[in-house]
Image: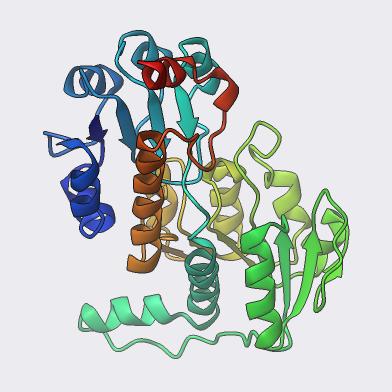
Amino acid sequence: MRVFVTHNPEDQEAYFGRSLPRLESLAEVVLNPTDHDLSTAELIDASAGCHVVIAHRSTPGEPALFDQSPDLLAMFRCAIDVSTIDIAAASASGVLVANAGKSFIASTAELALGLALDVARNVSASTVDYRAGIEPGQRPGWQLRGSTAGIIGFGDIGRYLADLLHAIGMRVLVHDLAPVDAAGVESTDLATLLAESDVVFPLVPGSPATTHLLGADELAAMRPGAALVNVSRGEVLDEDAVLAALESGQLGALGLDVGQAADQRPSPALAQHPHVVATPHLGGLTPANADAQAASSVDQVEGILAGTMPPRSLNPDDATRLRAWWDR
C-alpha cells in the first residue's frame, strides 16, 4: 500500500513527528514534496499511484481528485471538519472518506477560555506595549467570576467549556437547537443570551445555516461593550458587521482563533484591530491532540490493511474501490 500525506513540512512535524514511523511500518509513505499546501492539481500529480491520501484540513477533496486518481481507495481527513471534501463526488467514484477522532475538545475549549481571559484583562495589549518599550497604561478589565457567558451550540466543546466557566464562577447561558439538560447552565433563546451575556462564544459547526449566524442585527442585540470569542468557524461571523461593531464600541473586544483567511485563520483586517486578540487557528494544535489525530489516521490505514472498514467512515456503503481492492 502507498499512502500520501498532504501536510506541508511545518505541519508534518507538528502532526506526524511521532506517528510517521508507525505509518511507515505499515505502508510506503509519500510526503508532500513542496513547502506549501497543495492545490488539487498538485495533489493529483504528487499522489499518483497512491491508495490512500491522509489530508490536512487545508487540503480540499474536489471531484477532480477522485476522477483523476484511479488508484485512490480512501481519503482520510486528519481532522474532524470535512466540509471541503466533496463526499458525494468521492462516493460517485467509489472512494471512501473518513475523518479523525475528537481529540481536540479540551485544547479548543481551553483556548476559548484563554482568549476570554486575555480580552477581559488586556494581557496581550499590555505585552505588546512592554515589548515596544512602552510603559502600559493601567487598562481597566473585568472579572469573569460573577459575569455571564453565553454559549451558542452545546456540543462537545460547548459542554467542556461550560464546565470550565461554571467552575470559575460564571453564570452560563446556553442556546442550542436541541434541548439542553446539564448542570450549571441555563438554557435560553438566542435573544436573551445575546442581551445578557458579557462574553459570547459561538460554538457551532460550519454550514449554510450557521454562515453569518452573528451579523449586524445580532451584534446590535448584544450588551454594549460585551466581548465575543470565536474558536469554531470563521464564516459564523459577518466580519464586516463585526468590524463595524468594534469601531462603534458596541462590541468591546474580540478573541479569534478562526476566520475567513486561508486555512480558516483570522482575517488580517480583524486580527490587526487594537481591540482584537487573535491566534492563527491553534485551537487543536497541542502535542496531545496532534498526536492523537495523526494516530487515528494511521489506525484507519491499519484497518484497511486488516480488511475492516475503518472507524469514522462517512460513506462506507459507497467504498466500491476499497471492496474491489480487498477482493483482489
Q: Is residue 229 above or below residue 219?
A: below
Percent coordinates x, y for residue 155 in the rendering: 69, 57
Q: Is residue 84 above or below residue 165?
A: above
Percent coordinates x, y for residue 136 in the rendering: 35, 86
Residue in front for this viewpoint, 38 or 22: 22
Q: Image check: 23 left or right of 171?
A: left
Percent coordinates x, y for residue 174 in the rendering: 79, 64
Can you tell which quarter of the image residue 95 is in?
top left
Asked if residue 262 can be seen in this view, the reply is no
Percent coordinates x, y for residue 216 in the rendering: 69, 45
Q: In this view, does 6 lie above or below 239?
A: above
Residue in front for this viewpoint, 161 or 210: 161
Q: Which quarter of the rendered picture does the C terminus lie within?
A: top left
State the colouring used for the structure image.
Answer: rainbow
Q: Which quarter of the rendered picture does the N terminus lie within?
A: top left
Please give the name of the residue rendered at 38% of the width and 76% of the height, measured from the top-left corner. Answer: 124
Q: Image check: 318 left or right of 43?
A: right
Can you tell which quarter of the image residue 128 is in?
bottom left
Q: Image check: 3 left or right of 86?
A: left
Q: Image check: 120 left or right of 127?
A: right
Q: Residue furthest front?
A: 327
Please give the name of the residue rendered at 84% of the width and 51% of the height, measured from the top-left corner. Answer: 178
Asked if residue 320 can be seen in this view, the reply is yes
